Image: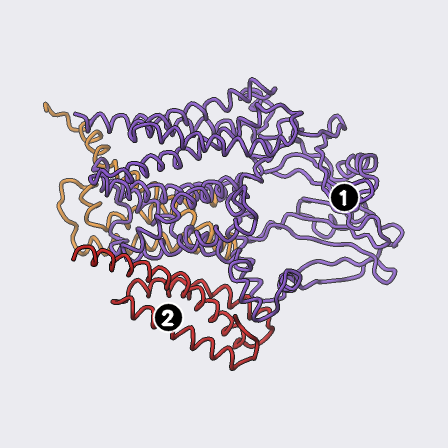
Amino acid sequence: MLILAQILLQLIGFALLSLSIPRHFSQVFQHTSRPTKRTVLALRCGGYAFVILAVIIAVNSWGVSLGLVYSVATATLTATMLAVLLAYISKLLTVIGRGFIPTTK
Amino acid sequence: MSWLHTWAGFAFGWLLFFIFVTGSAGYFENEIDRWMKPEIAIVNTPIDDFTILNKAQQQLNSLAGDGAQWYISYPSIRDPHIDISWLQLANTELDIPRQWHEKNLDPYTNNAISSRETSGGETLYRLHYNLHYVPIMVGYLVTSLATLFMLIALVTGVIIHKKIFIEFFTFRTGKGLRAWLDIHNIFSVLPLPFHLMITYSGLVLLMGISFAPVIDATYGEGKKIHRQFYDLFQVEDQQQQFIELNTADLSLETALKDAKVRYKNQAISYLGLIDRHTSQPSFEVWLDANEGIEFATLITYRIVNERVQIAQSIGKTHSAAQVYDILEHLHEGLFAGTYLRWLYFISGLLGAGMIATGMIIWVNKRKKQQTRLINVIDKLNAAVIVGLPIAIACYFLSNRLLPSAMPDRAEWEMHSLFIAFALCGVFCALRVADKAWQNMLWVAAALYAFIPLCNMLTTEHNLLLSAQKGDWLMLGFDLSMLLFSACFAFSAVLLQKHTSKIAI
Amino acid sequence: MNLTTKHLAALNITCRVLIALVGGYVLAALSAILVALLLPGDIINSIVSALMLSFIIYTVTVLYVFATKTTLRAGISVFALCILMYCFVRHLNGIAVL
């Protein structure tokens, strides 16, 4: 249960952080070209907040050494999941997009 | 820096790949051991600690009457079986060497089972620092040197990858060299804390050997002195107290009873009887630590001044030893539960992938030169990167296929690994580079798929039966083999698509 | 003309590698001995602490040797530091180091 919470929090955190990077922002939100400075700041703050929250919860639940191990290990897991997702996100989104917006093309 | 990164990585690339793969296998050493000893009895239902003790003592009394040390291993999640082991002292008259014996106990039939003689998961993982066929010291020193190169490659890698955070999640598929570089970055950066930890702690674990001259100059020379240095450095603070128990009553039963009262919520992992043949035996109760990154707690019962005393270690005395312990525990990951254990394993494989992609990039960057040397290295890459998994598959298969009565059976399982490895080298040398990669991937896929099949054909275990009996380790191993097979098949298909694209 | 520049480059690299690996090891070992002798408290604790830190010195030395402009500068720096360490160690206690 705790592990699941750890994964979810870090997933959200890193997702927000990845969106704060222009390249990935444009991958996901295909119609907008670049995110505004404000958006980037909001995404960065939100992202870090979630990740830091995850670390605090981990240290609280398992103690310092074990908690840090859980945080760092989960960070590797979630970041890898996101990297894979983002690599194929444009393909995924066009498929989803086509599903919702029927075109003749 | 880029130059240094390339060549520091290249110099020991294949050896480091070997170290990472065999080391990662070590995180599932117990599970691999279980698969390689299919005869042992699995304990699925909780059995009373004292019942286990009684059955074990019965067997030990009949089999190990003159054993100097007795150990009883209790069932745990990773080792759901009961084992007894005993130390037989050397007997020069009868030409018997000092050796440990081990038997598995079936609590349901009271049989003592001897499993097939196997190198098991333990020898497989020890390959990553002992190497093989070379004296242990050579293994340690070569591994240390390779690890130093690894550290340099990691640090230079971080230095040259200045855009590390911008490209954190980047993976541009299908663009040839760029894609390989992206994958190499992902395999390196995302598990970077793991890589740095494992490399630095690896260096520290072997520092007594690699920097022995420092100990010579500051403490003293010679094997004995170094041994003394190590023992002194590892000394622990002991908390000792006398307890209300008659010295005549001190036995494994009473020690166990006392320990269970003091540590109500901790599971027993081992019971030990040390120095049985002397007038001062001591009784050990090992408990699962359940806390932090420690693995176990040890309580020792012995008779001191005609009273029963219990002693428990409350930590290493020297602060440096405490730091050393943290690095050691992080490296070995013995404390890790299922979730962390899989992440350790995957991070290790990502490290192996980091090295493999590095070697592939090295070749791909120079492919245009079309020299003989580049071609040979390309083929050797295939021989090592796919050849090692193939060799390990052959190691597992040899466990099932070698006759049980064969002399030196355990060593021959290891020989099978290296023979298969060598054959992969020969095969790749003879094939065209592209064909070599293709063929090797399909061979790997086939071999890994064959492992559970071989299990079914040569033992009474199979996927269905394991699921029914709740033999999760056996089932998990077989399913993992199928998963690896699928990964290799998938890679083979990807490679086929890629080469046909280029051909067009 | 081409032959000598190629040979010079190869010589350069070989020297840097040797200075980095051998010189780095000697420097790291001497520094560890020095640190072990300088640290207060139990000698065993000091030796182990010094050993654990020695790899940082080794790595930094290797990086430095390959980052400096000339091989000569790398060689002289490492050699000079080794001599310096050796003198300090010798001064602190008379134990023969090598």
- Spot occupied by residue B218 in the image (x, y as percentages of width and height): 57, 71
Q: Which amino acid does label 2 sit on?
A: Val
Residue C58 location in percent, x, y?
42, 64
Say which quadrant the C terminus of chain B sits in: top left
Tag 1 secondary structure: strand
Mark 1 residue crowding within 10 angstroms, few (<14) / some (14–19) / many (20+)? many
Place of residue B211 in the rendered image (x, y in percent of width and height, measured from the top left): 52, 62
Other residues around mark 2 within 10 Å, as few (<14) / some (14–19) / many (≥20)? many
Residue at x 77% of width, y 28% of height? B110
Image colouring: by chain
Question: Which residue lies at the image location 37% right of the left edge and 49% below the top edge?
Answer: B11
Residue sticking out furthest to the top:
B457
Chain identifier of the red chain? C
Q: Mark 1 points at which residue?
A: B70
B318, above or below B281, in the image: below
- Share a chain, discs 1 and 2? no
Q: Which amino acid does label 1 sit on?
A: Trp
What is the drawing colour of chain B? purple
The one of B375 and B265 positioned closer to us in this rendering: B375
Camera sees residue B172? no
Which quarter of the rendered picture does the N terminus of chain B lie within? bottom left
Element assignment for label 2: helix
Callout 2: chain = C
Question: Vertically, is B438 above or below B143?
Answer: above
Chain A: colour as depicted: orange
Gap between marks 1 and 2 measured at Cα:
54 Å
Report the residue marked by disc 2.
C78
| Residue B293 visible in the current orientation | yes
Answer with left or right where residue C22 lies relative to residue A82. Answer: right
Drawn side of residue A36 relative to residue B243, left or right: left
Give the foreground label among 1 and 2.
Answer: 2
